[in-house]
Image (spheres, rainbow, N blue to C red):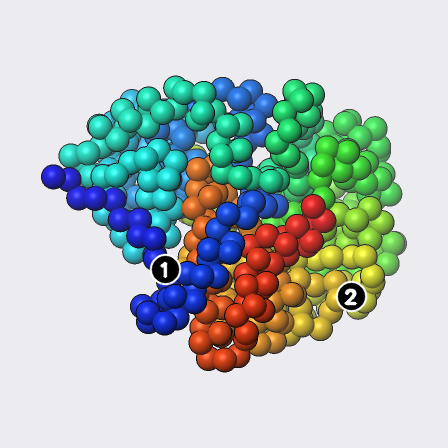
């Protein structure tokens, strides 16, 4: 008999039976709450077209860089996983073969959050009861492929089955958002909104920056050869996104640096980056100024800012040259927030109506900087444990690191930040279990009453994200 898939009802709860009972009772209060997914990277085309997902490998493996970064670390080529090359070179196209390769290496994910998410999808979405192994790979593939041919596994049906109340995708200012327009025109009641990600037109080191500014001018009707016209173009695109449901902007800068230059200095700096003649220092200064400009615009139009610094993206030059962006080669770096954010906070840190959510990949910054900043400035909130720390241990460390200084209500609950659609309910379930585990510890130590813990659990699972992202 094949090994059974291990998805235990008490997974991630404490081993101590007394605390586990408290955690289970708290979890029972929140497990059925709707999912609020305020920041992610699912494809809006799925919900616009509402066509069957093509096959198990395309749905579950190819969009998930967590999976193929682990496989690549063990010497498995991305070509063999069907990841398209920039030069059009030969890659594996037999998706059953890709699935078998993944199954043969599924043991690599033991103890990782990817294993928790994947097993959850197999069990709760597809009803698979056997562990994925080389011996079960074909039967599981065939079962999932059969499921995907049915109406109840279409994207909109899964959206409703997952109890998703709202999901936000992420698009460039250059996107015309026609998939979002098609969703709205279809009459379907599922709420799929966009988020404004301006990196391609605010980062001088972004590939094609000059061409992107030209395109920004064309679609906005503004003169992006001038500083004033450039800012007007960004305001126009923000309004365009907000008309299609956007409530947030998203900023993936290498650092959290901000600046507050006077207009004359801004014009000179923009002239250098617009011509392509900027230095590395110019590029960093321009990004820093643009975070402050984005905050100024958010004060006017109400978009919530998300700042995601601290990642050296595309660290592996060979992979970037061969496959392009987002191929699992992004590496966390040390990040300063106290000094970096001070220019922006000196200008806008006490403004009512402005909201900025901070994320980090530098865990040491939580207790040293982020909890204290968010515990003081009214415009700041802390995003959840993110990316590499979107894990049971990472979430627990996060709660222990920030709660005593920032409390629960200077955080924003959970967001899944994923391209892998079927991992969304798994990720939210994991976050709810870990938060209930943490709260159960507080109750067992008589630091929090059970009724208060139940209220906090609901807030962390649902209410805080809705409030923080103005949903």
301 up-or-down from 360: above or below: above
| Labels 2 & 1 near each other (Cβ < 8 A) | no
Which x, y percent locates residue 88?
A: 41, 23
Q: Which mark is residue 343?
A: none
Disc 2 marks which residue?
349
Q: Is residue 413 left or right of 300 when viewed as pictured?
A: left
Residue at coordinates 53% horizontally, 33% vertically from top-left? 160
Horizontal relation, residue 216 to residue 300: left or right: left
**N-terminal label among 2 and 1:** 1
Indicate the position of residue 187 as horizontal and vertical percent values. 67, 22
Residue 220 picture quarter: top right
Q: Which quarter of the image is occupied by the N terminus? A: top left
Q: Residue at image x 43%, y 67%? A: 22
- Asked if 294 appears above or below 80 in the picture, the reply is below
- Residue furthest bottom as drawn: 446
* Residue that mark 1 sits on: 12
Describe the element under mark 1 as helix, strand or loop.
loop
Q: Nearer the viewer, mark 2 or mark 1?
A: 1
In-image side of 115 versus 404 (left or right):
left
Name the residue at 56% across, 39% down.
Answer: 164
């Amino acid at each position: 008999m094949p090994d059974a898939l291990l998805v235990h009802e008490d997974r991630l709860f404490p081993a101590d039976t007394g605390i586990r009972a408290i955690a289970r009772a708290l979890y029972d209060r929140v497990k059925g709450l709707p999912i609020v997914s305020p920041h992610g990277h699912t494809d809006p085309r799925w919900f616009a077209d509402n066509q069957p997902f093509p096959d198990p490998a395309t749905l579950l493996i190819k969009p998930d860089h967590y999976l193929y970064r682990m496989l690549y670390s063990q010497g498995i080529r991305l070509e063999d996983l069907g990841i398209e090359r920039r030069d059009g070179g030969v890659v594996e196209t037999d998706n059953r073969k890709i699935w078998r390769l993944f199954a043969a290496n599924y043991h690599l994910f033991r103890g990782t959050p990817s294993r928790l998410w994947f097993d959850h999808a197999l069990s709760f979405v597809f009803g698979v009861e056997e562990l994925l192994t080389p011996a079960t790979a074909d039967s599981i593939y065939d079962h999932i492929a059969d499921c995907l041919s049915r109406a109840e596994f279409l994207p909109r049906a899964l959206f409703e089955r997952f109890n998703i109340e709202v999901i936000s995708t992420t698009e460039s200012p250059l996107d015309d958002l026609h998939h979002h327009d098609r969703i709205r025109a279809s009459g379907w009641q599922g709420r799929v909104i966009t988020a404004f990600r301006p990196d391609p037109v605010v980062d001088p080191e972004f590939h094609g920056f000059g061409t992107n500014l030209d395109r920004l001018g064309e679609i906005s009707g503004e003169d992006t050869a001038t500083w004033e016209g450039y800012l007007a173009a960004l305001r126009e695109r923000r309004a365009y996104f907000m008309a299609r449901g956007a409530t947030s902007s998203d900023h993936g800068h290498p650092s959290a640096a901000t600046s507050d230059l006077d207009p004359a200095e801004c014009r000179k700096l923009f002239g250098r980056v617009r011509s392509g003649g900027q230095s590395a220092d110019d590029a960093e200064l321009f990004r820093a100024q643009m975070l402050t400009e984005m905050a100024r615009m958010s004060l006017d139009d109400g978009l919530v800012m998300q700042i995601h610094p601290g990642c050296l993206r595309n660290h592996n030059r060979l992979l970037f040259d061969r496959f392009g962006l987002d191929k699992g080669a992004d590496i966390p770096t040390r990040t300063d927030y106290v000094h970096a954010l001070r220019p922006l906070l000196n200008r806008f840190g006490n403004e009512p109506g402005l909201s900025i959510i901070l994320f980090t990949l530098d865990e040491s910054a939580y207790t040293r900087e982020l909890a204290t900043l968010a515990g003081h400035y009214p415009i700041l909130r802390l995003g959840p444990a993110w990316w590499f720390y979107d894990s049971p241990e990472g979430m627990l460390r996060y709660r222990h690191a920030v709660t005593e200084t920032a409390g629960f209500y200077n955080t924003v609950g959970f967001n899944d930040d994923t391209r892998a659609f079927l991992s969304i309910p798994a990720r939210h379930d994991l976050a709810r279990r870990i938060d209930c585990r943490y709260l159960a510890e507080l109750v067992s130590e008589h630091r929090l009453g059970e009724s208060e813990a139940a209220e906090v659990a609901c807030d962390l699972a649902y209410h805080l994200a809705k409030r923080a992202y103005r949903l």
